[in-house]
Image (tube, coloured by chain):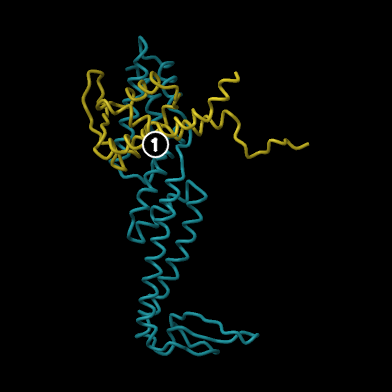
Amino acid sequence: MADDVEQQVEAYLNKVRRKLRGLDAESTREIVEELRSHILEKAAMSEEMTSATVAAALRTLGDPDELASQYVTDELLARAETSRSPFRMLDSLFFWASVSVVGFVVLLGSLVGYFLGAVFVLVAALKPFHPATAGLWMSRDAMGDPVFSLHLGFGTAPNVGREVLGWWIVPIGLIVGCELVILTTRLAQRCARRYRQARPPRSI
Amino acid sequence: MFDSSGHDALSGDKWEVQLRKGCLELAILAALWGGKRYGLEILARLERDSDLIVSEGTVYPLLSRLKASGLVTSEWVESDAGHPRKYYALTAAGRHRAREMAAIWARFSASMSRLLTPLAREK
C-alpha cells in the first residue's frame, strides 16, 4: 500500500480514535481495527486501491467525529445504566455531559444529589469531633419562619439559632446521606436508560 | 402568511428517514439470520435486498450496540484480503428478538396495507 494512501486512512482513523475518549483501550482498538478493515476492503473493491477509491470509502463512512460520537454515546449510556458506584457514575456522566445537553442536565442534578448526600454523611462523621457545633441548626428569618442549615462544626458556633437534633444527627445523617447517594445513582441510571431507548441512530 | 400545514408535520423525506431508522435494527438482525457475516457483507446484503440506503457509518455503531445488548456476538477471522474481518452472529436472544420483531412488522404492515388500499386504487 502506497504511503500516501496509508496516511489518508490513518488520518481518518486517528480522528475517530481521538473522539473515542472515555472508552477503554480494548473497545477503542476493536472499533478502529474494524473500521480499518472496512475501509481497506471497500477501497480495494475497484481494480486498484488509489487515493480516490480510499477517499470514496471514507466519504461513505461519514464524518469521523459523528461516527465516533455514535459509539461513545451508546457505550457511556450503557455504562451509566449499570454504574452502581457514584464515582463510576460521575465519570460516565461527565462524558455524557460533554456530548449532549441532556447529559449536562443529568450531571448537574446528580452533582447536587451527591453533594447533599456527602454533606449529611460528613456532618454525621464530624459530630463526635465537634459535639457542640456540628449538626442541624435552626434559626428564624426576619419573617419568623424557620431556616435550617447543616454545620460541619469547624470554627465557632453560629450566633443565632440552636442545634436541633443533638446526637441524633449521627444515625439520621448517615441514613439520609446514603439514601440520597443511592437515590441519585438510581435516578441517573433511569435517565440514561430512557435516553438510550428514545434515541434513534442519528443519521442514515 | 403562515403555512397552514404547520411546522410539526414531517415532510415526506424526513418521514422516510425516520421510518428507515426504525427498521434498521430488524434489517441487520435479518441479514444475520442465515449465518455469520462481517460488516461489509451485511451492508451489501442490505443494499441488495432492501432499499434501506444506509450510511455505512451508522451500521457499525449499531452492531456494537447490538453486541452490548447480547443480541449478537463477534469474532475476528483472518482473511486472504490481508486484514482480519470482524464476523457477527446472532445469539439465541438475537434470534428470539428478530422473530419477535418480524411478527410485529408483519402485523403492522398488513394492517397498514389494508388501510391504504383505497389510496392505491384511486391512482
The quadrant in which residue B69 appears is top left
- Which residue appears at 37% of the width and 57% of the height? A89
Colour-to-chain, yellow: B
Pinpoint the chain carrying mark 1: B
Q: Amino acid at mark 1?
A: Ile
Colour-to-chain, cyan: A
Mark 1, residue position: B104
- Which residue appears at 78% of the width and 36% of the height? B1
Question: Looking at this view, is B65 or A61 the one in front?
Answer: B65
Residue lying at the far right in this picture: please name it. B1
A79 vs B116, left or right, is left
- Percent from the top left, x then y, of residue A164? 46, 88
A37 vs B109, left or right, is left
| Crowd tier of the residue under label 1, counting other residues whose Cα lies within 10 Å: few below 14, some 14–19, many 20 or above | few
Whether residue B123 is situated above or below residue A104 in the rendered picture = above
As helix, strand or loop, the secondary structure at mark 1 comes to helix
The quadrant in which residue B26 appears is top left
- Which residue appears at 44% of the width and 20% of the height? A55
Question: Looking at this view, is A30 or B75 the one in front?
Answer: B75
- Percent from the top left, x then y, of residue B71? 29, 39
- Percent from the top left, x then y, of residue A182? 37, 66
Whether residue B41 is situated above or below residue A157 in the rendered picture = above
